[in-house]
Structures are given as C-alpha cells and as structure tokens.
Image (tube, grey):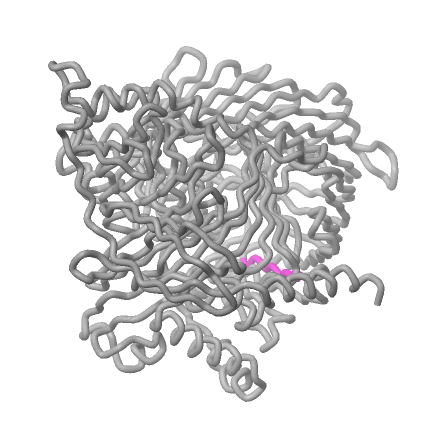
Amino acid sequence: MRRYLPFILFILVAFTTSAQQYTLSGRITGQKNEMVPFASVYIRNTTYGTTANEEGHYQLKLSPGTYNVIYRATGYAEQVQKLTIADQPETRDIQLVNEAFKFSQVSDKWKQNMDPGDTIMAKVIARRKQHLEEAGSYSCAVYVKGVQKLLSSPKSLTSKAVRQALDLDSNGRGILYQTEILSNLNVALPNKMHEVTIASKQSGINTAFDYSKASDLQVNFYNDVFKINGLSTRAYLSPIGTDAARHYDYRLVGSTVQNGLTVDKIEVIPKRENGQYFQGNMYIVEGDWRIYSVDLMLTNKHASLNLVDTLKISQQYIPITDSVWMPSAVQINFKGSVLGFKFGGYYQGIYNNYKINPAYPKGYFNGEILKIDTAANLKTAAYWNATRPLPLTRQETRDYQKKDSIAAYQKTDAYLDSIQHTKNNINYFTYTIFGYRASNRAETDSLYIFPFLQTFYYNTVEGFGINAKVRYSHKIDDLHSYSITPALRYGFANKLFSANVHAEYLNDPFHNQKSYIEFGSDVLDLNNVGTRSRYFNTLSTILYENNYVKYYRSQYGGFGFQRELKNGILWSAALQYASRTQMYNNAFGHVVDVKNKEFTSNNPLAPPGTPADDRSFLFPKNQALTFATSVAFTFDQQYVTRPTGKFNLPSKYPTLTVNYRKGIKSAFGSDVDYDFASVDVSQSNIRIGLSGFSSFKLTGGDFFRNNNLYYMDYYHYLGNQGTTFDPTYIGSFHFLPFYTYSTNGAFFEAHYQHNFAGSLLNKIPFIRKLKLEEVIGANYLTTKGNPNYKEFYVGIQRLIFRVDYGISYAGDKKYIQGIRIFYGLR
C-alpha cells in the first residue's frame, strides 16, 4: 500500500487544484461572424494558454482572479480582454477585427533601391543564430491533437459497407483517425531532448502520416533547413536560413502595432518556382528582429511532396522573458487526393508552462528521447474531458464515442469468435510473396508459413526442391516471448533430405536481450554473407542458365546470445559445431536453351570453361567448432522507452562494430584453426543541407592466424551477379562476383552513396512531376590477391523502384558495366 501513497497524494492534490478552477470558454469569430479556427488564447505575462478548435471554440481553466487574456490569430488584430473569474464558469465570445497593415509607417526607413522586406529579413537572418540559442535549455508541457479526415470519395468506389465501416456520411465524408498526446518536453541545446508522454489516445485507422510524439512538431524556422517527417526525403530551406537571401525574395506588405510592438508582415517569395522552398508570410518584430508568427506553406506542385498536395505550417511565438520567445502553438494543416479520394486534416501543438534554463540533474539526457508512461493508454474519457486544452468539435466527439464503443465491442468474446475464422483465411496471392500468418484471437499464439517463393525452388545441385518452413511464436507476456522455426528440405535430383530447427527466446526487451539455439542439417550457400535469394536463383538458373549460387551441406548445432550492455553498446556471441561436406551439380534443366551459355561448376574456384558436372576438389569433409562475437558501439544512441521495451532510433553519428571469430582446433574433433578480426564503421542518412543525404560503410580485417580453414570460413562479400540487385544495404556491391574475391587474408572495403532526393531533377520541367531521386555511389575493395577493385554508379529511384547504371574496374582494367534493377523483391 505504501508504494501507492505518492500516486494517491498526487491525485488528491490534482483534484483539489482542479476543484478551485473554472472554465473560461467561448467562440472566436471574425468581422463577418465567420469562425476563426485555431486562434491562440493565452494569459498575458504567463506561458499558459490554449487554442481554439476547428469551429472557433476555446476553453481555458483558470483559478479565481483577474486576468488579461490575449486573443491572437494570423490576419487579425490582437485583442486583449480583461476579465475576472469568480466562483463559476465564464463565457466570453470574441469577435476579432481584420488586421490593417500599413506600409506608410516604415516606407521612409529603408534603402530606396530595394524592397524594405529584403532589409528587414536581412536583419532577422543576421540574428538567426542568436534567437536559435537564446534559451540554452527549457521545459514545457505539450498537448498534440491530430485529425485525419476523408473530405469526399467517389461513389463508384465507396460502397454502403465501406461507408458504414469507416463511419462516412452519404457524401463519403468522415473522420478516419484521431490522436491526442499529453507530454512533458525537456530540451537542452543543441540536440538533447527528453520527453515523457503521460497520456495518449488514438481512434480509427492512420492512413497518412503520424506525429506520435511532441518532438515531431518541433518545427523551428531558426534552423537553416529542416525535414518534414513522412512527407518527403528532401530538406526544405527556412526563409531565414543563413543562405536564404539567395533563394527568396521578400516583400513588405505592411506594419502594425501589436501589444506595443511593431510587427512587419513579410511576404516570402521563392526566386524559383520549383524547389525546396516555402511560400507565404512571416511576421517579424521590429527592433528585436525575431519571429512573431509564421504562416507558410509547401505544395506538391512546387515542392514535390509525397502523400499530400498542400502542407500549411502556422506558428505563434510569445515572450517567455524579456529576451526569450518560444512557440505557444504550432499547426500543420494538410490536404491531398488519391484516386478520387480527397482527404485532409491537421496536427495541432499547444505549449504551456515554459521554464527557461531549468536545472537538470547530471545524466538526465541519457539518450532516452521519449518515455511512454505505463498508464498512458489507459486514461479514461473523464480524464481527457478534464485535461485536454483543445475542445473537441461535435464531429470529433461523436467519432470518439462511436469508435470507443466499437473498440469495446471488438474485445468481447462474441466478436472475437465471429472474426476468428475470417481473420485467418488465406489469400493465395499474398501468401506467394509475403507468406501466411494465422493467430489465436488473443494474438498470443501465431503460426507463420514462409512464402511460396521461398518454398519451391530449383538449382543445379538439388534440382527441383522443397524447403517447407514455418515459425510458431508464443507471447508469454509483454516482456517475454519465444519462437520455434522448423524446416524440412528435400532435393529431388540428389535425393537429399535435410531438417533443422531454430528456437529463439526474448526475455528482456529493455536491453535487446535474446538467446537462440539451433541444430539439424541444411544445404547452405558457400558465401555466408548471402548471394541471391532462392527465388531469383531459380529464375536465373531455369531461364538463363546462370547457376550463380554454390552450395555445400552442413550438419550443425549451436547457440547464441545478445544483450545491450549499456545504451549504445550491443554485444553478441555464438558457438557452433558443424560437419561440412562438398556438393556437386546433379541437374541441368532449363526452359530456354541460351546460345553460347553453359552451367558452371559448383566449385566457385574452378577455372572458366570447367564443365557443369565437374567433381573437382574444393575442400575435404571437415568438422568445425567456431566461436564468434561482436560489439557494436552506437555513439549518442537515442531511443524510445515503451511499456513493452526499448526501441533504438537511428543515430546522427557512425556505428563502430568490432568482430572476432575463432576456429577452435581439436576440440570435439574440430579441424579448423584460425583467428579472424575485423572492424567496420558505418552511418546512414547523413543530411547534407538541401542536397540530400549520404551513407557510407568502411570495413577492414585480417586472418591474423590461419593455420587451417576452409572455403566457407573465408571472409566473403555481399556481391551481385545478374540484372537485379538489392540496394537497401549500403555494404553491397553492384558487379562483384559472389565468390571470386573471398579471402583468407587481409582486406579493406569501402562503400559510399549519396541520394540527392530530387534536388537536381526537380529543376527539369515535366521530369519533376515524376518525383525521382538521383543516386550516385562508389564501392571499393582490395585484398592480397585482388587489389583495387572499384565500382562507380549513377541511378534514379522512386519509392521501392530503382535503376542504376554502373561500371567496375579490376585494377586498371574495365571489368563489367551495365544496368541493375530493384523493384522491391530480394
């Protein structure tokens, strides 16, 4: 009972405090009685406030007293109302007046040979860094509200059943998704952040993009560039970025006086019609030369957005101290259309109770950027009604009520029983590519059948074959689970049967801890890094007589373990014993007899021209006991802590991985005797201003003792043969043969790739509509026997599709050149 006393005390204090507060509410309209959505409402000389909802309604809880309440919206004159809260709720409807910006007030202040807006913005840009860093650290409470709506839909594609399922009206309109978040946000410049989500609520189906934490709405125009998550791979240039004057023109619309401050309205005009630029208006405080508010937008037509057609960003700043201003509200409004379905919505952030330069304890910013309270998703409707600062509209309230009722019904035994059979029905098309999954109604037990494309295959060693593989998973609780994956394999040409089992146990998701055990027999690739999937090898073998993959047989047993020793330090280790046997070609079937083309030997080191039925010696039957371990250091590792575990996020810094592998001689008859070590450094998605992002990987290693090892023990590379390739991993080659360069000595490989994210092709009319991304890259490898292998390539990419053209050199001689294609399948 004692451990619950602090919580009970907190509830009592909160209840007592809320009991002394009363609600100030009303509706905000314009001069023509039109609603003014999302207007800011806050108490002067405080950092406490709210915004109105889509219909102009607002609510603010206040203790008894007298207040100066500021009502503020872009395009309207700021209004201050003095009111007194006694012992009952207060209603105050507000009618805002259109703002009158007068040019004459400032027309004589600036140089005659340029627009005053250019001079004003030059002063803002000069103070950009000062305003960016004026609050070294801060904390605040953040409320985020998101709504996604279907605005209209074609009747031919929207049946009655679909309208009922999505709760749409007769015109195909309705709310698809709602989300609310209450968080405490803590920030220390330049890049430290820690957020605690104390309440979270979702309803419906997210069909577009989602800002699932308050930090996602940290839209700061004092930064030079920033990326809008989920909508583009490109970065966009702030109108007050260091280099902004080269890309924007600025026009002074006029000036006005707000709360004793002269505020200039500046129209932001991109110099080029298409590019990574905003358009709209910024409002600047004269003298301080800082942002007062922002009303900017991006369009798909000019800025190559994904998913949406227009994106509007509105932001209001308020003074926290005499020298520090911070956002009081930010809104992202979007609209788009897909196949005749028109959608739109918004994400609204409200910031309260700022504290500037609070005293954070040592070690407070430890990489955990978000922690979700264990009870965050359990808050009741009464809790939200009492705490949300943004009142719900009638439509939003109705949507919550209906979907909450549906969600409650979907947890009943009657519903779960009724959908169990339907949920587990098999779709043969999706099974062919993605596999089939069935589960019990509680989702604690599931069975996954691997795809048809991985089950039936053909190769020259086994002929046609079956690799029947399933995975059974059981969830013990939120923190413990295990899976068992048995596989049966049979080759019809060599009449060889294999069977193996892999079992994995996850028991500490807060430290990424898992262990596994495996044993059995299998037919494996001689290149342990991987070559072509069974699907692509089957196609290339049957259709083109390219039997690229070379196999051997292994009877093995082993176990492994992984754990994060400390945030950013991941350790893994494995011990395996195997009996390995060389295999030979037994089948030579093909659909098309390709002229001047023959199958190759299953010995990858056999010289060119060796017949396909070659039985040349590659290695004797051997036994190998091997130990492998690695430690990965991710610098400044950031992560999210959920009630179900720790989830690491990509780091802004490289990851360093140290690997060691040992062949243990004599133990249990083991024949191998070697020591191998390597180090690699890698990083992905390094943002390079407006010019896209880069990725790289560097790896070097050596067998510093190689008394006895066999071909499968060599260090192998992720090469590529054939027209298709897999560009999703930065450490792969475009043209390197799978086996030729494998080594038992020292090596060094380097990979670099840059994605321009459309910043070049966007300058070409018509081409820009395709939203293509330009890619360039280079790969390098040197070993003792094969020095200075190089590749250079260029490519274009759109979503999962990519086409590259490249050329490779072996030493100083041109080796291979050609086109490589990727279309989502590996």
Which one is nearer the viewer's eye here, 516 or 589?
516
Residue 556's place in the image compared with 762, above or below, is below
In this rendered view, identify the residue nearer to me: 401 or 59: 59
Q: State the residue in front, 788 or 798.
A: 798
Whether 290 is drawn above or below 437: the answer is above
Instruction: List x then y, in percent, for residue 84.
Output: 45, 59
Horizontal side, residue 697 vs residue 116: left or right: right
Total marks shown come to 0
Q: What x and y, as percent, mark residue 700?
A: 61, 21
Residue 619: image x %, image y %? 68, 34
> Residue at coordinates 22% horizontally, 44% vertically from top-left?
299
Residue 110 lies in the magenta stretch: no
Which span is picked out in magenta? 484-492
x 80%, y 34%: residue: 671
Task: Give the residue furthest to the top.
Answer: 812
Q: Which residue sits furthest right? A: 667
Reply above or below: 529 against 92: above
Q: Look at the image and tell me in which quarter the N terminus lies.
A: bottom right
Asked if one can make out residue 702 in the rendered structure from this viewpoint, the answer is yes
Query: Furthest-bottom residue in view?
Result: 414
Q: Where, by quadrant of the figure, is residue 400 drawn?
A: bottom left
From this view, report whether residue 478 is shown above or below residue 538: below
* Residue visible at 40% across and 64% down in the picture: 25
Q: Does residue 804 appear in the picture of this structure? A: no
Q: Is residue 354 left or right of residue 522?
A: left
Residue at image position (15%, 19%) is 108
Q: Where's residue 199, x and y in %?
A: 57, 60
Q: Main secondary structure of the magenta part?
A: strand
